Amino acid sequence: MKIIVCLKQVPKNDSILRINEQGTWIQDRDLTYEINESDAYGLEAALQLKEKHGGEVVALSLGPARAQSVIKEALARGADRGIHLEDAAFNNLDAFGVATAIAAAAKAEGFDLLLTGLQSDDFGFAQTGVIAAELLGLPHATIVMDVESQDGRIRVKRELESGFFQWVSMPAPAVLTIQSGINTLRYATLKGIMAAKKKEIKKFDAAALGIDPVQLAPKMEFRSVYLPVKNKQTQFIEGSPSEIATKLIEKLKNEARVF
Amino acid sequence: MANGILVFIEHVDGKINRASYEAVRAAQLIGAQTGQEISAVVFGQSVGNVAAEVATKKIKTVYTVESAWLKHYTADGYTHAFKQVVEQTQPALALMTHTYEVRDFAPKLAASMKRMLLGDNVGHRVEDGKVVFTRQIFQGKLAADVVPVGDAPHFASFQLGSFRGDECEAGQAAVQALTVNLDADVVRQQPEERFKEAKAAVDLTQAPLIVSVGRGIKEEKNIEIVKKLAHAMGAELAASRPICDNEWLPMDRQIGSSGQTVAPKLYLAVGISGAIQHIVGMKGARTIVAINKDAEAPIFEIADYGVVGDLFEIVPALTAEAEKMRH
């Protein structure tokens, strides 16, 4: 089985975010980065499928030079090869633009499965994989909890609302978006880190992928970014733990009247 | 010229997903703000009863799209059918509630028409006759105003709870059948029966008081202190997703988009940051209390009472106070 896993490099979860002066995005100096959470579960799912069926896992990331560290981490965990999509034209793309680049790279590479995480921890659109499937003309499934492969068909367990699940099958090649928390992530061993140094990372820019900048034109625009406007007035309760406890219970009893 | 707002009505085997009425309400408001008519569309094999129920809302036309290929939901089937409906009815905006089903097909639908879904919006306003959507980024830590680029049709969805479905204006819609072309080449997914895994031992939707625990608890053995608090308050115990993924608590305790959605009198969130997937499951609670050591945690945006501090000190103190109250 040949599996391409898409990994996005995102600001670390506990990052302090500062909005830039124009109010159009966050400032990225002083930020540290990590692999997007659900993408890491996609990588683990791919590695487990490779252990079961044989084949290879290719780690792909679109981003500036620093995105290489995400690919290297994937290689250290067991991916066989890397693909880095880097181009000035790839900065600040919307999900449609990113999916366009990923689809072009994946199509050239060939695959049985193309995996992305369910959504990114920064934008949270949850669309890149689905759009890539459409651009590639391939079937897809989202919010995937489990993947089975047999005779060129893929069968996946999808998570639904309210505790429901559903198995769905479709022909390969297919595109899947993977839910977080579905498996236990393996981390890179020292042996893996050393082995990763010898693994190939191919680099592509827009021209190498045959992408015309027009294809990357935005389909949506961030007008402004700001601190959320609070609709609620939160009463913060302070003091020692026992003072807090007394005040809170009193308020819940007499003000909010929940008891 | 493209005009009007088309609302997607979701159902499973003829049972309407009531979240769809939130999109109807959004369309009614936006329609009034922009001077546009609204319509709705239902897909399935036999959807007359669904259409009839939706037609009791103030909507101009409810379109029915019936086909054997739409008997069960598939991303391919719904996308291809919806695209043909958009081409036939030419709306300016297709509007949906951001459910798991919409996440599965709406991005594909928009992409098939060279557009992008503006998904999971929490608000909107109208500026110069155009809709500006507001959505959350960085898991709720920041907000962003977004607009589509390019011509209509545009595609957008609202987060669960952004509008009140029970506030839809009543009316009398016309019901009109539309025909679409679908076949085996187009519909590639083969879905099996939906199922629940664990038989739910507790129905959290009926609990008036809920104490919920999240990642801040750090270890499984620490959950005991939150259990004690719940017991002292006479509340049911619930959890955010990571706690159930780790199997520290069973799945029927999970609150959030993939677990239960609750609206109790009291929701006390202990060590829960307030990621969107959790918030959508509990933001309807009458009184929300949050205890978290991070003052920036998004949970505080929806909390009525907040405690920024160490839960390992505060929870036991609260338990002692709650026990005093009950005796």
Image: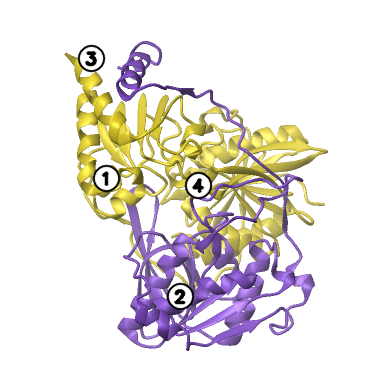
For mark 2, name the chain.
Answer: A
For mark 1, name the chain.
Answer: B
What residue would you read off at disc 2?
A: A74
**Amino acid type at mark 1:** Asp
Q: Residue B252 carries which label?
A: 1
Label 2 and label 1: CA atoms lie apart by 34 Å
Label 4 and label 2: CA atoms lie apart by 51 Å
Which of pointers 4 and 1 lies earlier in the amino acid sequence?
4
Q: Tell whether label 1 touches label 3 (CB within 8 Å).
A: no
Q: How crowded is mark 3: few (under 14 residues within 10 Å), some or many (20 or more)?
A: some
Which of pointers 3 and 1 lies earlier in the amino acid sequence?
1
- Identify the secondary structure beneath mark 3: helix
Label 4 and label 1: CA atoms lie apart by 34 Å
What residue would you read off at disc 4?
A: B48
Name the spot of residue A56 as percent of width and height, x first: 43, 86
Query: Which chain does the purple colour mark?
Result: A
Label 4 and label 3: CA atoms lie apart by 55 Å
Q: Colour of chain B?
A: yellow
What residue would you read off at disc 3?
A: B325
Position of residue A256 relative to residue B53, above or below, is: above
How many numbered circles does the render carry?
4
Residue at 41% x, 83% y is A194
**Amino acid type at mark 4:** Gly
Relative to the observer, which residue lies in front, A105 or A152?
A: A105
**Amino acid type at mark 3:** Met
**Amino acid type at mark 2:** Ala
Relative to the observer, which residue lies in front, A230 or B251?
A: A230
In this view, the mark in front (4 or 2): 2
| The quarter of the displayed image where residue A136 is located | bottom right
Name the spot of residue B131 as percent of width and height, x first: 73, 42
**Residue lying at the far top of the rendered structure:** A254
